[in-house]
Image (spheres, rainbow, N blue to C red):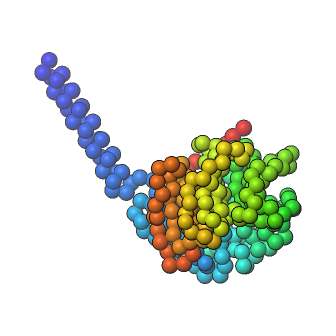
Amino acid sequence: MYDNIKIYIDMLTLSGLITSLCFCCQVTGFQNKLSLIFSTYGNIKELNLQTGEVMQLQTDIQSRIDTIDYDYRNGYIYFSRYTKSDIQRFQYPELTNAVTVTVARLPVGSVIDPLYNHVYWTERFTRKLYRCNSDGSLKSVILQEDALFALTLDYRNRWLYYSTDGTNKSIRRLKLNDSENQTIINIQSELVTGMSIDNDKDRLYWMEFNNGFLKSSTLNGSSVITVLNTNTNNKNQDIHVYRGNVYCANGNSLLNVTPGVSAHVIYNNTGIIYSVFIHDENHEIRTYT
């Protein structure tokens, strides 16, 4: 009997040691790295959300960078160079020099389709939405209508969402098989500069540049709510939703917004921040039928 009790106590001790070791691993930096990739004029930087450390990824880009996206399958960051009229990419986290993927006339929004290795982007003044392969080949126009700006992709349901910047500003969506094109929200006078989708809750989020409102709706445009008023005018840029949190470029600051709970500044920069993207090193590409 005493031998059995000793074995039981030894097992509890071992279990406690394993639990303590796991806890120590979490608090000493062995967890998956989570980084916020963001752009200032001419630069792309990485903010380590666990340590707060900031590192330069690319410098001397010589342009405003309105959007950043990541190809998890092939390990590239893609970004649009507005004033240089092209889309570029570089490897990350193993850094390489940026190279041009395709030329584009004053590109604004850009997004990666991880299932089909496509790059989509909007050109505000040509009023065109383009697509090419991830290496820049087979470039084609898939839509032309109003002045276009922000862009995001619902890759599960195969919808592209984009904002328009005409007389009557709106958020629209295009089925990737070209079977449907819908206006889902009339924004009226507000320019939408950033959009992102919460795939876990099937909600669309967007930022309104002029009044600083962060808003949300269902994917079909219903049940619109105001998530946050940033209280700043003409300084509100890109957003990215990750695990229920919305990361926002708000003038010189980066905000972390938990809808209905909190909003706080996580980083202050000396210049304007244009685009944001959360990179999770443990991210997995999932396929949907």
Query: Measuring 14% from the left and 17% from the top, which residue is drawn there?
Result: 1
Q: Nearer the viewer, residue 31 or 64?
A: 64
Q: Nearer the viewer, residue 232 or 74?
A: 232
Residue, far left = 2
Q: Is 183 displayed left or right of 60 in the figure?
A: right
**Picture mark count:** 0
Q: Does residue 270 sit above or below 182 in this rendering?
A: below
Q: Quadrant of residue 196?
A: bottom right
Question: Is residue 41 visible to the viewer in this orientation of the structure?
Answer: yes
Residue, far top = 1
Query: Measuring 61% from the left and 60% from the top, which residue is drawn there?
Result: 213
Q: Position of residue 17 (x, y in %)?
A: 25, 41
Q: Quadrant of residue 166?
A: bottom right
Query: Measuring 57% from the left and 75% from the top, which residue is drawn there?
Result: 272
Query: In which quadrant is the C terminus drawn?
Result: top right
Q: Position of residue 149 (x, y in %)?
A: 74, 65
Q: Position of residue 212 (x, y in %)?
A: 60, 64
Q: Position of residue 119 (x, y in %)?
A: 74, 60
Q: Is 74 displayed left or right of 188 in the figure?
A: left
Q: Nearer the viewer, residue 129 or 11?
A: 129
Q: Is 263 displayed left or right of 134 in the figure?
A: left
Question: Is residue 77 visible to the viewer in this orientation of the structure?
Answer: no
Query: Measuring 39% from the left and 54% from the top, which residue is drawn there?
Result: 30
